[in-house]
Image (cartoon, coloured by chain):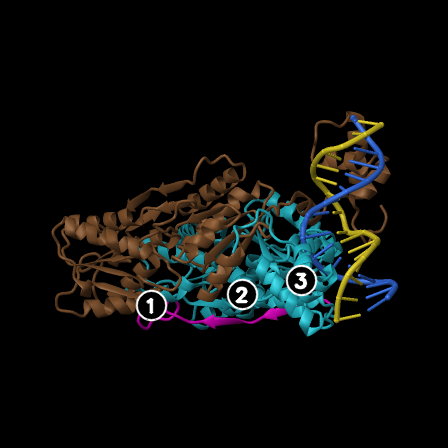
Chain colours: A cyan, B brown, C yellow, D blue
Amino acid sequence: MEAVPNKPATIRDVARLAEVGLGTVSRVINDSPQVSKATRSRVHKAISELNYVPNPTARRLSLGRTMTIAAITPFFTRPSITERLRGIENSLAESEYDLIIFNVETVARRDELIREVPRRERVDGVLILSLSPCDEDVPILEKADVPIVLVDANHPSLTRLNRVIVDDVEGGRVATQHLIELGHRRIGYISDFLDNAFNFTSSRYRFQGYRQALSGAGIPFRSEYHGQSEHGRYEAERLVKMMLNNEDRPTAIFAASDTQAIGVLEAARDLGLRVPDDLSVIGYDDIEVAEYLGLTTVRQLLFESGQRAVEILLESFEQKLAEPLCEVLPTELIIRKTTTSRSGYLEF
Amino acid sequence: MEAVPNKPATIRDVARLAEVGLGTVSRVINDSPQVSKATRSRVHKAISELNYVPNPTARRLSLGRTMTIAAITPFFTRPSITERLRGIENSLAESEYDLIIFNVETVARRDELIREVPRRERVDGVLILSLSPCDEDVPILEKADVPIVLVDANHPSLTRLNRVIVDDVEGGRVATQHLIELGHRRIGYISDFLDNAFNFTSSRYRFQGYRQALSGAGIPFRSEYHGQSEHGRYEAERLVKMMLNNEDRPTAIFAASDTQAIGVLEAARDLGLRVPDDLSVIGYDDIEVAEYLGLTTVRQLLFESGQRAVEILLESFEQKLAEPLCEVLPTELIIRKTTTSRSGYLEF
DNA sequence: CTGTTAGCGCCTTCAT
DNA sequence: ATGAAGGCGCTAACAG
């Protein structure tokens, strides 16, 4: 074995060493069937002798494909997001595609990425997580020349884009219904801003479900029972403390995410309210810590949503999709200790 | 505006429209100073008219650089990892480099990635997170023809690789010392397997610190006070329950991560032990939920470690580094309610 | 079956 | 200051 050569070997070096033409080497690499066994093994020998690895960039240029998939995602430290990303990575690991992650932390970057990433020259496909298109984004995305799959994101006027979503209206309804069935009539809802610059829509849809459940039970909606602010545990805590300060305070809180539900639990603790006896709490997502806290919540298939999105993307590369898919993943109500009292939350 | 052309515009189209040569357009794109103001604006006009964007793949092939950085990381759902990744993404967002994330979930993949990713043809630089090289990996990595920065990873015989690490021995020592100063003599240590196929080393080093602190205080090490298993909350819970079953049970536990510390808290709850009165608990990392739980812990600069690693990598592209850096980030003891009793943990 | 050739789109000399 | 030409490494179409 000689010293490592300065330049990596190219297909030409292999051809020379194996005494064949460039084309043959290329065929071997892409295991085309039309190569004799003899030459094939000669080529393989040369390849391993030279420690040859095809240059992906050159390959991409020639193929006209980037062999790359982009994921555009907000705040990838949020548990619900990383779980989705894990599903994506998992499905992609076995493919020959690279995954590029674009993390959105400002609105400006959101817009920039939505405009500039979905281009044929950049990537072969795009996954957009939890960022619903605004009205202006819709035509841009629908005109994009690469396949796109929205995950946990939607827009009513979309017709040409694949989506993997969860029925947040239904999830919100189920959560609220659960509280109603436990006998609650004064039910608060804590969420992010329903209207926000990123256009996160899940809180909005869950709110709809919340109201549907209320009205289905003949309970009038009271705006003072809805608190909205930035996402986060502390923000939720602040909101709910204000809400619980009223005479006619809610006896149950539905939080739009588990993270916010934790804030609610914290508020309850500070105010000396027992959970669930004095206050029932339900979250959304079923992130890992929810189980530990005994938090009742609405589980969504986060990991699976990522996997499914990749599958759809790969299928769309092969034109297998007659028309855009809109797949709705199920939710599941997970009842734990913050809404029912046996071995109550407070023992902790 | 015409219909979107089937093929994106190329540099040639721009040249034709602007009535200049290819080279000139290229110069404008890369804003070379040697282009007259007049032609430059003509070219810019053509560019925006054609909606031209340079093809990155072609650019890369021509430049001989991939404009891509790889991050190889285990389990990117662990909070400590995502926080590091956020730092990486943050520093890279403003650069012209793309970030490819390789998530390691099996040992086989770990080895595969360490061998195949750090190649000039694939990426311009590599960040390896929390995966310390094994003896066999060292020569491979040191011979790699691209710059590499290890984050939270190390190996005694490394000399040519940049590293951003935390002094885990010291962190373990400080944590244990804190418990000793509170009067504890029977101190348990709960960790991942000190020897594991992934070669995670942090638990090992923290263990060293733990033992240093013990011996510094004249406390003999007792092997029954060390529990190791897979990483995870439940595993930790199981371990500590066994440990606490003894007559001579520990009065304090140092857990190698906050996640494991949570398992310890859970065990304490199940066993009816009050924290910190009956059992003090300290974790490591200061992940987000630690504050909520009032968990005493050792904070490390996770986000910053990612940022710093990128800075080092970018500097090494420009040959600015005389010799490999090994940067040690500080840790900080965060004292909360699981080791001191005012407004004890149990009120929760 | 296999060798040869013409691009893929861009950057970079080298002349002018 | 600018145009022309060669080359980055590979794939694919075309001859044989």
Query: CB of mark 3 within 8 Å of CB of mark 2?
Result: no
Labels 3, 1: front one: 3
For label 1, the SS is helix
Q: Chain of mark 3?
A: A
Residue identifier under label 3: A18
Nearer the observer, A307 or A210: A307
Nearer the observer, B15 or B245: B15
Q: Which stretch is magenta?
A: A323-343
When the figure is inspected, residue B175 is found, relative to residue B42, above or below; the finding is: below
Asked if marks 3 and 1 fall on the same chain, the answer is no
Q: Amino acid at mark 3?
A: Ala
Q: Position of residue B66 (x, y in %)?
A: 62, 48
Q: Position of residue A194 (x, y in %)?
A: 56, 53
Labels 3, 2: front one: 3
Circle number at residue B234: 1
Nearer the observer, A277 or B227: B227
For label 3, the SS is helix
Quarter of the image for residue B256 reads bottom left
Residue identifier under label 2: A90
Label 3, label 2: how far apart the Cα atoms are? 37 Å
Label 2, label 1: how far apart the Cα atoms are? 24 Å
Most frequent secondary structure within the magenta stretch = loop
Instruction: Name the side, left or right, on which B243 lies relative to A246.
Output: left
Packing grade of label 2 (10 A; few <14, some 14-19, many >=20) is: many
Q: Amino acid at mark 1?
A: Tyr
